[in-house]
Amino acid sequence: GAVVSQHPSRVICKSGTSVKIECRSLDFQATTMFWYRQFPKQSLMLMATSNEGSKATYEQGVEKDKFLINHASLTLSTLTVTSAHPEDSSFYICSAYSREGRLEQYFGPGTRLTVT
Amino acid sequence: AQKITQTQPGMFVQEKEAVTLDCTYDTSDPSYGLFWYKQPSSGEMIFLIYQGSYDQQNATEGRYSLNFQKARKSANLVISASQLGDSAMYFCAMREFGGGADGLTFGKGTHLIIQP
């Protein structure tokens, strides 16, 4: 099946700094990628839809200036958490549909962000 | 109102028994898809099974089957002959095709523990 990778798998940063998380589709091209956030013992919440070559679409309540998304190529989307605060500590997961039109989303392994 | 409701926060099941995980959904879109994902403690999201709103037959994938009752708006996951490796969080999710948004809406999940 299609593979989606994320880097880094874990990151610890200090409050006020920015962190970039990469999401790559390894064996397929993804015109659309998604970023989800999961707090401990909670469900996944869609943050934004990342579209190759255009601006991301953010869900209601998600600050687009805080969570910068760039989808510069058909295989790479990045999420940058700017001026991170401890409340941004969470599990961030990306996903993508393959261009072959498969209905299920392929998820990356996730990135655990801890802001101290 | 929640779009996806999973009423079982946790379940304990004996190994080799069948288990049913409940999921009800709410949508006014006639075209939608329902998904089940498994999330082990490692955090990765593993796709299990998909049911389209227009599919006439219940979906099956190996030991997984989806009991789709459209009039009741329910899409329960049935795992036959449970195994210790089935212990994980299970999420029901929906994608509404008519609204233009491609992201998934997840339920709160069910923590399934298989006991030997």
Image (tube, coloured by chain):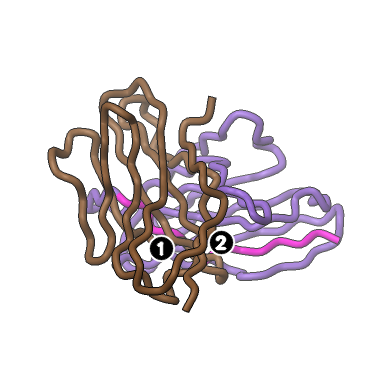
**Residue A71 place in picture, x, y as percent:** 49, 49
Q: Is residue A105 magenta?
A: yes
Quadrant where the image shows the N terminus of chain B? top right
Residue that numbered label 2 is attached to = A22
Badge 1 element: strand
Looking at the image, which is closer to me, A106 or A99? A106
Q: Name the residue: 56% across, 61% down.
A: A22
Query: Which residue is painted at 27% across and 49% down in the image?
Result: B66
What chain letter is assigned to the residue under label 1? B
Left or right position of B70 against A33: left
Q: Position of residue A94 (x, y in %)?
A: 50, 55
Q: Which residues are magenta?
A: A104-116
> Which residue matches tag 1?
B46
As helix, strand or loop, the secondary structure at mark 2 comes to strand
- In the figure, the shade used to draw chain A is purple
Is residue A70 visible in the rendered image? The answer is no
- Picture residue at 41% right of the left edge, 27% below the top: B26
B64, above or below B97, in the image? below
Q: Position of residue A56 (x, y in %)?
A: 52, 38
The residue lying at 56 percent from left, 34 percent from top is A58
Q: Identify the hue of chain B.
A: brown
Q: Look at the picture and state if B25 lies above or below A17.
A: above
Foreground mark, 1 or 2, reads 1
The residue type indicated by label 1 comes to Ile
Neighbor class of circle 1 (other Cα within 10 Å; few <14, some 14-19, many 20+) is some
* Extreme-left residue of the structure: B56
In the rendered structure, which amino acid carries the disc numbered 2?
Answer: Glu
Q: Nearer the viewer, residue B77 or B35?
A: B77
Q: Are marks 1 and 2 on the same chain?
A: no
Q: For label 2, count other residues whose C-alpha is less than 10 Å away and answer few (under 14), some (14-19) or many (20+).
A: some
In the rendered image, the residue lying farthest to the bottom is: B116
